Amino acid sequence: MAQKPSIPKGTRDFNPEQVAKRNYIFNTIRSAFQTFGFQPIETPSFENSNTLMGKYGEEGDRLIFKILNSGDYLKKADEKAYSGKNSNALTSSISEKALRYDLTVPFARYVVQHQNEIEFPFKRYQIQPVWRADRPQKGRFREFYQCDADVVGSDSLWQEVEFIQLYDTVFSSLQLEGVTIKINNRKILSGIAEVIGASDKLIDFTVALDKLDKIGEDKVKAEMLDKGIPQSGIDKLQPLFALSGSFEAQIEALKTILESSIEGKKGIEELSFINEAISTLGLTTANLKLDVTLARGLNYYTGAIFEVAAPEGVSMGSIGGGGRYDDLTGVFGMKGGSGVGISFGLDRIYLVLEELQLFPDTIAKSIDVLFINFGDKEALFSLKAIKQLRAQGIRAELYPDAAKMKKQMTHANKRHIPYVVLVGEEEINTQTYTLKQMNTGTQEKVSLEALIKTIES
C-alpha cells in the first residue's frame, strides 16, 4: 500500500482562494512600499552559515535550519565531535549552508557585497519566505513570508517617522482599524541595565524582558535571577513594570529613572523626537504607544524598536516589527552602515483579516464568465468570443468537455462564477450569446458588445 502523503509540520498548502487572499495582502503592502520610494531586491533562500549564525542571539541561532553538505557529508565530519556526540561542534563540519532566518541579515550581506553599485541612502523592500525551526502553533509557522522594508546609509530619525506612517498606510488600506504600533528604544534598555548594575548582562536582560507579555512579571524576574542579575537590581525594575499612562507621561517618568544614564537619556531624546513628529503629522487608523518593556530579543538593534499588535479582541501575537541597527553591516566589514527597517507578518495579518471578515468579497472570484461546451462547433464559436473578452481584461473560460449541462452548471456554482454563457445552433446563426446571471438565474440573448459591457459593469 502506498504511503499516505504529508507535509512537514509548520508548513502549509494553499488553495486558490487562500492564494488570492494572500496576494491581496502582498499587493497592498507592495503598493505602499513603492509609494514610499522603496526598491525591490531578492536574495537566495539559503546563505552561508557564517552569514547567519551569531546575528540573532543564542535563541535565534537554535532556530536556524542547517543544510547538510552535498554528497557524503559524514566523510569530512569532525571525528572527535561525532564520537563525543557534540552536536554544536559537529554541525560546522557537516553543514556550511543554512536557510535564511529573516530578510534583514541577508539584506546587510547584500549591501556590503554590492556597496559599490548602490546609491545611498538605499531604500529596499523584499517579499520572500523565511524558515525557522520553531514549535508550530497558531500564527507561528516554520515556513512563512516576511515583507520587509529597510533604509541603509542614514541615521536620520525621520526614517523612523516614515516607517510609522508606512505601517499606518498599509493597515488603513487593509481596512484594519485599531492596530497599535508599540515603540521602545534599545538605548533605554541599555540605560536601565546600567542603572540596575547589569550592563554586562544586557542580552540576558533584554531576552527575559521581551517575554513579559508571554510569561508574566514573576517568571521574567525568576529568569533574570537565574541569569545572574542581582536581586537588588531586579528590585529597581519595579517602577518599570508599573509604568503606564500616555506617551508623554511615560517619557517624564523615564527621565527620573534614567537620570544617571547618558545612554538612556539619548534614547529618551530619540523617542520624544519621533512622538512629537507623529503627533504633528497624525495617523489614520493606527495608534502609537510607548512600551518600555518591549525588547525584541535580537542582538542587532541599537535604537528604536517597533512591534505591531493586532486590534483588541483578536487573539494574535505581533503582526509586524523592526527597528534601528546602526552596526549590522559592520559584522560584514562595512562600517557606518546605519540602517532601520520594519517587517509585516503576512501570515498573521491574513489570520486577523479572516477573523474580522475584512477580505473583500471579490477576492475569491477566479473568473468572470464560463462558456458552456455543447460540442466542437459551439466551442470554436465560443473561443472566438473568449479571445475578445480576454483582450478587454475579462477573465473568461470555456468548459473543456461537452459534458452534461447540469455538470457544467454545478462546476460554475462551485467556483462562484457570476456569469455563464450558453451558445447553441440558434446563437451561432444569429451571432448572439445567451448570458445567464448565476445569482438571480435570469438570462437574455445579447450581442458580443452587450456581453462585454454587462460583464465589465
Image: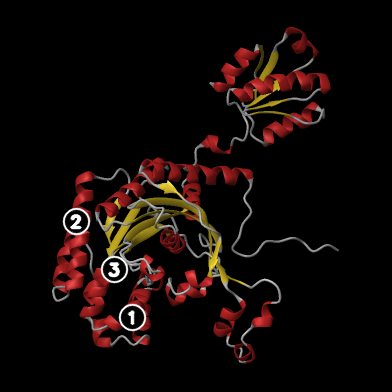
| Identity of the residue drawn at 32% across and 48% down | 286
The residue where tag 1 is placed is: 221
* Residue 175 appearing in the image: no
Residue lying at the far top of the rendered structure: 430
| Identity of the residue drawn at 56% across and 79% down | 92
Residue lying at the far front of the rendered structure: 116
Q: Earlier in the sequence, mark 2 or mark 1?
A: 1
Q: Report the disc number at residue 304.
A: none
Q: Is residue 255 above or below residue 88?
A: above
* Element on which disc 2 rests: helix
Q: In which quadrant of the rendered view does residue 112 lie?
A: bottom left
Q: Amino acid at mark 1?
A: Lys
Q: Amino acid at mark 3?
A: Arg
Give how far apart the Cα atoms at labels 3 and 2 are: 15 Å
| Identity of the residue drawn at 64% across and 20% down | 388
The residue where tag 2 is placed is: 273
Which dot, 2 or 1, sits closer to the camera? 2
Q: Left or right of 161: which side holds 71? A: right
